[in-house]
Image (tube, helix red, strand yellow):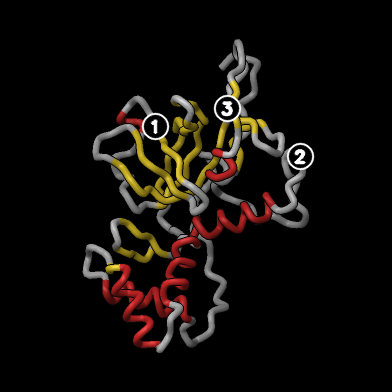
């Protein structure tokens, strides 16, 4: 980085939004960036998602934030912490790059998040930031919760639970309870969870409830097996 050039903002963004843009190559010291359809120029990103694929000892993994997936790729194996495993929620700060026609992210910071509640927090944060997005970068209307995920120097204290749940389990909570009961270490079989829920509840909504939990980041599925993200 040249001595007088400021460090670019790491934009809080969804993977889907990032991949919807066009990669632009600049000359000289100016950083390359992704031009988004709303006009924003994004040269650094701040993503939160789940690692859904990684080869041991490799310099890359696949990140899923519920909107889409993106490859995180480094050319040094040590740039990606060995403790980052499939199923882990992570914070990623990095720079979009282009390989062939595909956008990937070169990592600057990778932090494993101990509490997967940050996945839900980030989704709410994006809903506020992206609602009624003007042509230029959005200025949220009304208060936005302060995120501890914006920079490397800030804390990642887990979000507090609201305590507003009713005493009786909701249908979604019943699905999660089943997954916990049926998971003997390798995960609970997706079809078995759906069938058992429908039988016990006299319902046909098991699959729809399960899919909603997957989208919200409360369940994780790989190779037909489910786990609760705790």
Kindly indicate whether the residue at mark 3 contacts the one at mark 2 (C-beta within 8 angstroms). no
Q: Residues within 10 Å of mark 2 (few under 14, many from 20)?
A: few
Kindly indicate whether the residue at mark 1 contacts the one at mark 3 (C-beta within 8 angstroms). no
Point 32% across, 56% down: residue: 222
Marker disc for residue 20: none
Point 59% across, 51% down: residue: 147
**In which quadrant of the rendered image does the N terminus lie?**
top right
Horizontal and vertical percent for residue 196? 32, 81
Quarter holding residue 116:
bottom left
Circle 1 residue:
73
Q: 85 or 163, which is in the foreground?
A: 85
Mark sitting earlier along the chain (2/1): 1
**Horizontal side, residue 178 vs residue 131: left or right:** left
Label 2 sits on a secondary structure element that is loop
Q: CA distance from mark 2 to mark 1?
A: 30 Å
Label 3 sits on a secondary structure element that is strand
Horizontal and vertical percent for residue 130? 67, 50
Q: CA distance from mark 2 to mark 3?
A: 18 Å
Label 1 sits on a secondary structure element that is strand
Circle 2 residue:
135
Circle 3 residue:
23
Quarter holding residue 76:
top left
Mark sitting earlier along the chain (3/1): 3
């Amino acid at each position: 980085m040249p001595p007088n050039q400021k460090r670019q903002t790491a934009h809080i963004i969804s993977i889907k939004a990032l991949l919807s843009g066009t990669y632009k190559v600049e000359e000289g010291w100016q950083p390359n960036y992704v031009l988004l359809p709303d006009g924003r120029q994004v040269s650094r990103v701040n993503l939160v998602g789940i690692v859904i694929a990684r080869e041991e000892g490799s310099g890359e993994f696949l990140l899923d934030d519920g909107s889409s997936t993106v490859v995180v790729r480094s050319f040094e194996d040590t740039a990606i912490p060995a403790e980052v495993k499939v199923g882990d929620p992570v914070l990623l700060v990095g720079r979009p790059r282009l390989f062939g026609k595909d956008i990937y992210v070169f990592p600057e910071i990778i932090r494993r998040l101990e509490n997967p509640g940050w996945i839900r927090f980030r989704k709410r944060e994006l809903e506020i930031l992206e609602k009624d997005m003007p042509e230029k970068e959005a200025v949220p209307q009304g208060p936005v919760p302060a995120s501890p995920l914006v920079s490397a120097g800030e804390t990642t204290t887990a979000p507090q639970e609201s305590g507003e749940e009713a005493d009786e389990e909701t249908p979604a909570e019943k699905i999660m309870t089943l997954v916990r009961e049926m998971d003997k270490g390798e995960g609970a079989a997706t079809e078995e969870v759906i069938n058992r829920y429908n039988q016990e509840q006299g319902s046909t909504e098991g699959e729809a409830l399960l899919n909603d939990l997957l989208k919200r980041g409360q369940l994780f599925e790989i190779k037909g097996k489910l786990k609760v993200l705790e």
